Image (spheres, grey):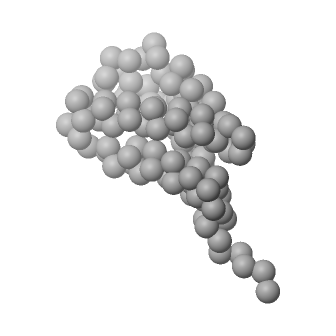
Amino acid sequence: MKKYLTLKNLGWLLISIATFMIGMSGISKVIATNEMVQNFEYMKLTPYMGLVGVLELLGVGLLVYPKTSLYGAILTSCLMSGAVTMHLSLMGGTGMIIPLVLGGLAWGGHCLRKYY
């Protein structure tokens, strides 16, 4: 009987959750939805919104492909740590749990896929 619940498959599940969440965030930044525009205007970072969105999509693409998943995990964790910093410094700490979890999912999924 074949085992389907392996650590490698769990890594793929974590990567898929992180990919979906970060990918949707990147797309909403690239197409400039109202919520993202308001958030970036509040932080006075509106000129960088498209760049951050493209970097998030690039990180997701690198994370999904197994040979470049290390670079994707590094890029997404850097972006998510920047998001945590902005949430702590400018927004009073509200909403900082999501970027922490997404960065952890990216690294956890990468490590489970690579080493197990």
- The furthest residue to the front: 115
Instruction: Check the picture and name the quadrant holding the C terminus.
Output: bottom right
Residue 102 screen position, x and y as percent: 46, 48
Task: Work out whether residue 52 can be spotted.
Answer: yes
Q: 43 above or below 72? A: above
Q: 111 above or below 75? A: below
In the picture, measured across the screen, residue 30 lies left or right of residue 95, that is right
Residue appearing at x 57%, y 26% in the figure: 55
Residue 56 screen position, x and y as percent: 56, 32
Instruction: Check the picture and name the quadrant holding the N terminus.
Output: bottom right
Residue 88 screen position, x and y as percent: 24, 35
In the picture, measured across the screen, residue 46 lies left or right of residue 3, that is left
Asked which quadrant contains residue 22, the reply is top right
Task: Work out whether residue 13 can be spotted.
Answer: no
Is residue 78 or residue 52 the one in the foreground?
78
Q: How many marks?
A: 0
Is residue 26 or residue 79 the one in the foreground?
79
- The furthest residue to the right: 1
